[in-house]
Image (tube, helix red, strand yellow):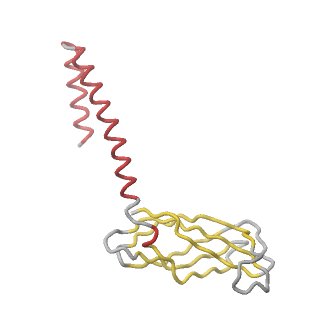
Amino acid sequence: MQWVLLVVIVAALLYMSRFYPKVAFGVLGVLVIGALVIVFTTNEVAQLNRSKLPVEYITIENQVFTPAYGDGFRFNARLINTHEFVTLKETTVSITLWDCPQDSGDSEDGCQVIGQEDQRIIVKIPPSQTRDVSRTLSFGSVKPRGNVRWRTEITETRS
């Protein structure tokens, strides 16, 4: 519908420019400035809509990392949208692979980061619901020498 309106306005301006060229170009300038304001305002509104759902409302449970083809790993988890009103449409999960000494226990002393990847996950999760996700991760030819530890963190959400 907007395109039809645009064609009608341009046709009217072309016809009007035959008799009143200064008025026609003045109206065209005002329309261009108005269109730019609308485009920039729409971008700001879209950005606000993306940030309606803070990362605190998305949790990850039941994380399982298994060896996959080649040097890759398979990441399986359950994402939970704990917000009461907003639907999650997309999230970014930061996944870090740590190599820790055999005798480190639960301590992170001596652990080294040997891989890090951000996974963009497009999944629609309505308010107060969960979805299972699965992704293949590739850190290149990483060879852990000790105990492998994983750290996951939700870094971005879009609603």
Nearer to me, 145 or 70: 145
Q: Is residue 90 above or below residue 74?
A: above
* Quadrant of the image containing the C terminus: bottom left
Q: Residue at x 42, y 79 (%)?
A: 130
Relative placement, left or right, of 2 versus 46 is: left
Q: Residue at x 32, y 31 (%)?
A: 33
Q: Residue at x 37, y 62 (%)?
A: 52
Nearer to me, 35 or 8: 35
Q: Residue at x 40, y 53 (%)?
A: 47
Whole-percent x and y of residue 75? Answer: 59, 76
Q: Is residue 66 above or below residue 117?
A: below
Whole-percent x and y of residue 55? Answer: 46, 68
Whole-percent x and y of residue 63? Answer: 57, 81
Q: Is residue 45 above or below residue 68?
A: above
- Total marks shown come to 0
Whole-percent x and y of residue 13? Answer: 23, 23
- In the picture, residue 100 is in which quadrant? bottom right
Relative placement, left or right, of 109 versus 42 is: right
- In the picture, residue 72 is in which quadrant? bottom right
